[in-house]
Image (cartoon, rainbow, N blue to C red):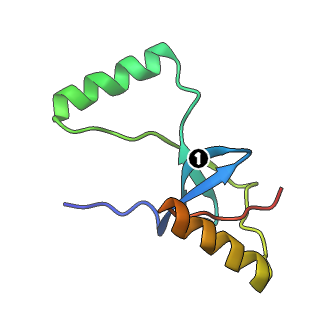
Amino acid sequence: MRLDICSLVIMIEIKGRLTVFMEGGGGMLCSLSTKLGPEDLKAINALESELGTPLLAFSCRADLKPADVSAEQLAKIQALENKLGLSLVAVKG
C-alpha cells in the first residue's frame, strides 16, 4: 500500500543551503527536518531497523510560499537547475 502525503517534491536553495521541499495539500512547503534531537534520531533509527527501510523526517511551514518570478528570473533559475542537475524553487523572503 502506498500513501501519498504530498503533491510535489522539489529542491530549493536558500542562502547557499540545498534543501528538499515538498508542497503539501494545504499549501505548505515542507523540508527535511534538521532540528532533530538525539532521542528523536534514536526513535527514527529504531523504527528504520524494525521496518527494514530508511525513513525521511519532514517539517512543514505554512508561512513559506513560492515567489512570483518574471520570465527573465525563471530563465536564470532554469539555467542553474540545468547546470547543477536539480530543481530550484524561489520562495517569498
Tell me where residue 81 sits by quadrant.
bottom right
Tell me where residue 57 sits by quadrant.
top left
Residue that numbered label 1 is attached to:
18
Q: Nearer the viewer, residue 10 or 13?
A: 13
The image position of residue 18, as x and y in percent, is 59, 47
The image position of residue 24, as x and y in percent, is 54, 62
**Looking at the image, residue 43 lies above or below residue 8:** above
Q: Residue at x 60, y 63 (%)?
A: 88
The image position of residue 2, as x and y in percent, is 24, 61
In the rendered structure, which amino acid carries the disc numbered 1?
Leu
Q: Is residue 87 left or right of residue 73?
A: left
**Looking at the image, residue 14 lies above or below residue 89:** above
Furthest-right residue in view?
93
Furthest-bottom residue in view?
71
Q: Residue at x 64, y 64 (%)?
A: 89
Q: Can residue 25 be seen?
A: no
Q: Is residue 7 left or right of residue 55?
A: right
Q: Nearer the viewer, residue 1 or 54?
A: 54
**Looking at the image, residue 3 lies above or below residue 71:** above
**Looking at the image, residue 85 lies above or below residue 74:** above
Furthest-front residue in view?
83
Tell me where residue 28 sits by quadrant.
bottom right
Q: Is residue 58 left or right of residue 4?
A: right
Per the image, label 1 sits on a secondary structure element best described as strand
Q: Residue at x 78, y 82 (%)?
A: 72
Q: Quadrant of the N terminus?
A: bottom left
Q: Quadrant of the C terminus?
A: bottom right
Label 1 environment density (alpha carbons within 10 Å; few <14, some 14–19, many ≥20) = few
Q: Can residue 40 be seen?
A: yes
The image position of residue 60, as x and y in percent, is 60, 49
Q: Nearer the viewer, residue 8 or 18?
A: 18
Q: Is residue 50 left or right of residue 15?
A: left
